[in-house]
Amino acid sequence: PDDQPFYFDDITYGGVVDAGDTGPSVGLPVDFELSVSAYTVSGFGGGFANVEAAPDGGKAFKYVKYDGELWAGVTLLLDDEIDVSAGGEFTVKVHSTVARTFTMKFDQADVQIDASTTGQGWETLSFDFSSSGIVSPQTSISFFQEIGTKGASEGEDADWTVFIDDITQVTDGNDLEPPVDSAPSFTGTFG
């Protein structure tokens, strides 16, 4: 009859849709140049996190440490798991205007490594987790600056603002120096 509700089931069309596909997946290396909505970032304990314009004109992960907890930091969640067995060294570009102790932590493993910034703008810091015993998978990376020190009061955050970019894993084999080309030497008689 005409007054009965009807239901549709298994409607298809000519394309294929993955219901879980929300855009490009985020994995290493991370350069923060995808759409801002692709990244899952958060701050904790008084840390502020956002992906936005960086001092060099590109996009980067902005981290401001406010005067909350002494360990206030930020976290980046990756869609793709990090296979630490492929290489335990990681490099991160950090922009800071103040010399700071900067910490990178793999959250699932609860292991962190410190490096120091010079406060001279962009620089590449290296974090070697090779001997830390981390096992895969790792998908959550946190960053801290000056653990044990309170950050900025509202409105005075310039000295506690850093930008994080180009998070890269140095995989085994990729950190080798290329062979040096040398001219071949010949001995003997030509003629």
Image: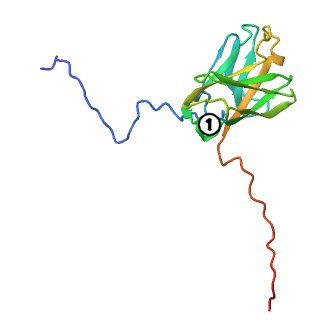
- In percent of width and height, residue 183 lies at 81, 70
Residue 166 can be seen, yes or no: yes
Residue 78 seen: no
Q: In terms of depth relative to the viewer, which is nearer, 187 or 183?
A: 187
* Residue at the image position 65 percent from the left and 45 percent from the top: 172
Q: Which quadrant would residue 182 be assigned to in this image?
A: bottom right
Query: Which quarter of the image is occupied by the C terminus?
Result: bottom right
Q: Is residue 24 left or right of residue 103?
A: left
Give residue 190's position: percent from left, percent from top. Answer: 80, 89
Residue at 20% in and 22% down: 6
Position of 81 with respect to 154 (left or right) is: left
Q: Residue at x 77, y 30 (%)?
A: 94
> Circle 1 sits on which residue?
28
Looking at the image, which residue sits at the far left?
Answer: 1
Q: Is residue 189 above or below residue 60?
A: below
Residue type pointed to by label 1: Leu
Foreground pick, 181 / 16: 181
- Residue 16 location in percent, x, y? 38, 39
Q: Is residue 71 left or right of residue 137?
A: right
Tell me the element at label 1: loop
Q: Residue at x 84, y 30 (%)?
A: 121
Question: Mark 1, residues whose alpha carbon is within 10 Å: few (<14), some, or many (≥20)?
Answer: some
Q: Quadrant of the N terminus?
A: top left
